[in-house]
Amino acid sequence: MPGASPTAPVCAISTEPPATGVLRRLFPVPASRLDAARTWLQLGARTPRRAREASSVLLVRDAPDGVRAWLGLRGPESPLGMISFAGGSCSVDDDAQLPWFGPTPAKWAAVLGMNDHMLARRHVLAAIRELFEETGVLLAGPDPLSLIEDNQGEDWMRARQALASAEFTFAEFLQRRGWGVRTDLLRPVGHWISPDYELRRFDTYYFAAAAPAGQEVSPLKGKDRWGRWVSAKEDGARPESEALGDEIGLPDTVGQPLAELATPATQVMLEKLRRTRGCVAYLSSKRHIQAFQPELVEVEDNLLLDVTTVDAAEGSAVARGR
């Protein structure tokens, strides 16, 4: 494994809420979820399945065509959507002790709007772990000002595969090398909860991070793995576009618009990236993290997801509708 190089930490996290408004949004229920949605409405009041704690990371970088985000393919039943940012559920192993650089768990709890310091710590560590598993990007180093560089090679891919198959824990992987997690390189950008009717549900905190110089980004090797940098301004990143589904080329994706393959959370965040001035502006934007949960509604015999989101500028000159 390679060494580390000094890097300047990203600006400090702020808990100051921005000036915000609200905007009601309606999203179509994906065709693959219509049966579950109709059953939920027909059976009336029920207790939804428990939402599992999860974290997701928008890995971003600047490009001539605007800010790009790394998107990957997931299974059709994933609560994060078939096309999404890196992420997954938290694990009991995310409570393991390891060197920690950056804001304390107490600070993270305040920023994420929760009282449980251990829960906040779990979400942050899960975000860094999932980012490494799914993209190869490792936000870790031997000290608070250093970051691993040159993550290329088969040894790295084997380590990611072994981590994904639970051959060892993320904490064990880092401790063997004397590395700690650089939590200061993450920025909280959202909190979304799966709709009540879903059979698999996530309570997901979203973070953002800039792609580190010297680290290569690649999907985890395996069957039907797909992932690439997508410009938020390209046609494929728009809800009505079938371009990404056709590019992936699977029976479940061909001919499907992004609105069918990505959750409302992913679509909203891509829209915000489309309007930002750049990565620095996006990562530096002040946010007040609050939970959004799409609600199933029926409008003129159509099943829709109704969610009210924050209408606030995120690294753009003017706040616009989201």
Image: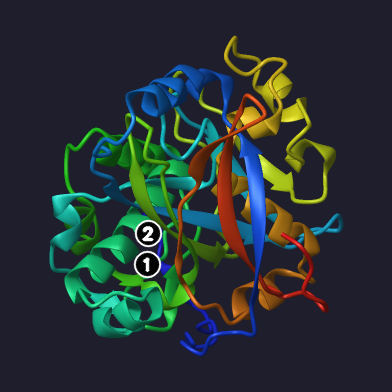
Q: Nearer the viewer, residue 244 or 99?
A: 244
- On-image quarter of the N terminus: bottom left
Residue at 18%, 49% in the rendered image: 169
Q: Which of marks 2 and 1 precedes in the sequence?
A: 2
Residue at 29%, 37% in the rendered image: 164
- The secondary element bearing badge 2 is classed as helix
Q: Are marks 1 and 2 in contact (CB under 8 Å)?
A: yes
Q: Nearer the viewer, residue 85 or 241?
A: 241
Label 1, on which residue?
Answer: 140
Label 2, on which residue?
Answer: 128
Q: Residues within 10 Å of mark 2 (few under 14, many from 20)?
A: many
Q: CA distance from mark 1 to mark 2?
A: 9 Å
Report whether residue 101 is seen.
no
Furthest-top residue in this view = 251
* Vertical comparison of 114 with 46: above or below: below
Give the label, 1 or 2, closer to the camera. Answer: 2
